[in-house]
Image (cartoon, rainbow, N blue to C red):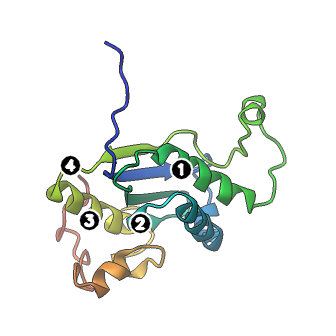
Amino acid sequence: MEYRRIRTPGGTYFFTVVLADRSSTLLVDNIEHLRHAFRHVRGEMPFRLEAAVVLPEHLHCIWTLPEDDVDYPRRWQRIKACFSSQLPKAASRSASQVAKHERGIWQRRYWEHFIRDEHDLHRHLDYIHYNPVKHGLVARPGDWPYSSFHRFVRRGYYATDWGDAPDAINAGE
């Protein structure tokens, strides 16, 4: 049986996207370029950005695609390319990167997960918003500036002190 990725039109997906250099701080150092890339691509190929967190070398987000659309790979390709084009060119690239028109900034692949139900959505929202604490970047989710956590607090989904106590949530799932 041939394996093929199944995508759901109008589906909601969790993504993890990572830089090639895991020691880099490129994403937070260039947060306005990343925001521009998202806005630009959303203007070309709409999707709803449900939640996001940007860390120094990776990001997590949840998107909902339009009802008749399954093309998140092209959106990611465009976001990566738009972000990368705003940065100074790297000194050297591998032959493979040159052949594939890559700048060598991003890992080629990314993790995607189809959100199956409300429980799955809430679990991934918690994972996203607790991630800066998990990585030791801040003591509390509300201390990290590059997160949709603040929007979720304003909407009453989270209390401002959510995640302050290490045992308050199960962020390791």
- At label 3, which amino acid type do we have? Asp
- At label 4, which amino acid type do we have? Arg
Query: Total label count?
Result: 4
Where is mark 2, residue-wise? Answer: 52
Q: Determine whether 144 is above or below 4 in the image.
A: below
Q: Secondary structure at mark 3?
A: helix
Where is mark 3, residue-wise? Answer: 126
Where is mark 4, residue-wise? Answer: 116
> Do labels 3 and 2 touch, CB within 8 Å?
no
Q: Which of labels 2 and 4 is toward the front?
A: 4
Name the residue rendered at 31%, 51% in the picture.
11
**Residue 63 place in picture, x, y as percent:** 38, 58
Report if residue 128 is visible in the image.
yes
- At label 1, which amino acid type do we have? Trp
Marks 3 and 1, how far apart at CA:
23 Å
Marks 3 and 2, how far apart at CA:
11 Å
Q: Which residue ends up furthest to the right in the rendered image?
A: 91
Quadrant location of residue 131? bottom left
Q: Determine whether 61 is above or below 129 in the image.
A: above
| Horizontal side of residue 44 vs 53, given as left or right | right
Res. 155 mark: none
Report if residue 140 is visible in the image.
no
| Horizontal side of residue 86 vs 138, given as left or right | right
